[in-house]
Amino acid sequence: SQLHPVLDAPTAHETEAPDLADAVWRGLTQSPKQLSSRFFYDDEGSRLFSEIMHLPEYYLTRCEYEILDTYKTDLLTLFSADNRPFDLVELGAGDGLKTKLLLNHFWNEQANFTYTPVDISKAALDGLVADITQQWPTMAVNPQHDDYFNTLKRLGDRANTDGNNTRLVVLFLGSNIGNFSPTEAVDFYRQIARHLNPGDLVLTGFDLQKHPAIIHAAYNDSQGLTRAFNLNLLRRLNRELGADFDLAAFDHYETYNPENGEARSYLVSEKEQLVKLAALNLSVQFSPGEVIHTEVSRKFSRAGVEHLAQQSGFALTNWFTDGKAYFADVVYQK
Ligand code: AVJ
């Protein structure tokens, strides 16, 4: 599809992602305070998220697993259309739980493909690659320890130099897209689109709008894992920025607004307190009940998913859902 020429200008995401120190400085000196959810995923955060995926309340992973299992044959037909080899480029691969289901099917069908998992957690990526080489010693795997935006640059380079026939299939599963604002999502997909060739595909997992209580419970689990995941961000700042956050003096709080589909996570200061961040030479005052906003997990309508495709230069070709229609895995074609 054709993109508007203005989109060829570099965008904010193609410059270096701001490092932790800069982002934390800005986030904690503004009002209301905020920290980006992309800082959740240190090694401990990635481990906690793997546990969250097994929670009874966290339906997202099970629903997506069901979809991929049900439609794996259809997906292989789409990915390998015209007998072209394909490269599965997975953004934010994590522990690859759901992807292994696809890899297993593609391998058994003797599909001609390579797997390129991308993750910012070295531990998660190493674990995934170890698993895969153990299970399929001769599978072509090219792990990329990097963030999405750097990887997108490389995707672009490959698209420009590749003389071969390989179809790029970008996987962005698990409703990771939900962490982006609507504007960021369009920007992100436009960047992907710019680097892809006609016939290349993107498979995205979208968590869908449903009864608000079901969504709220997924981010407010009874075992307190989501709470630990949220608070781990403060532990990371203590370690990496010499901060002295008292983890017992902050609480986890979740809201879901069914009018706009936004689940929002906060850390709440339990009392009046002063927190020092030595590496930033910064002291931050908290009033009782004051919050740090840490995450948005956006829930989509079908119209929203269609709109994103239109806005970013893709055609929506397939819409796969689980039996309860809680979640959708959607194919966009360039
Ligand atoms: C990995 C971003 C999809 O938003 O559902 C899980 C992260 N946060 N519980 C989500 C998360 C709290 C998750 N994503």
Image (cartoon, helix red, strand yellow):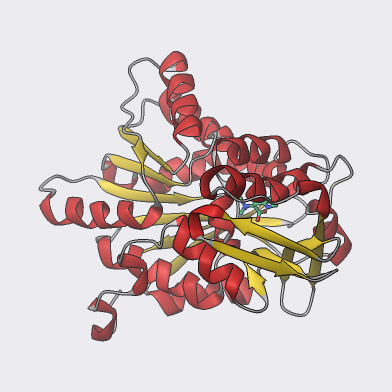
Total labels drawn: 0
Q: Work out whether residue 142 can be spotted.
A: yes
- Percent position (x, y) of residue 312? 40, 74
The image shows residue 151 at horizontal and vertical percentages of 32, 51
> Is residue 215 toward the left or the right of residue 236 in the image?
right
Compared to residue 213, the image places residue 83 above or below, namely above
Question: Does the image show residue 329?
Answer: no
Q: Is residue 291 above or below residue 119?
A: below
Residue 189: quarter of image: bottom left
Above/below status of 42 relative to 9: above
In the image, is 260 to the left or to the right of 17?
Answer: right
Q: Quadrant of residue 334?
A: bottom left
Residue 145 appears at what percent x and percent y?
Answer: 37, 39
Q: Position of residue 259 (x, y in %)?
A: 77, 80
Residue at coordinates 32% horizontally, 34% vertically from top-left?
Answer: 113
| Left or right, 146 with reference to 41 | left
The front one of 183 and 75 is: 183
**Which quarter shows the N terminus?**
bottom left
Could you say which is closer to the camera, residue 165 or residue 131? 131
Instruction: Write the residue at 76% across / 47% down.
Output: 247
Snapshot quadrant of residue 328: bottom right
Q: What residue appears at the point 51 percent right and 39 percent down from the top-left corner?
A: 73
For the residue pair 138 and 264, the one nearer the viewer reads as: 264
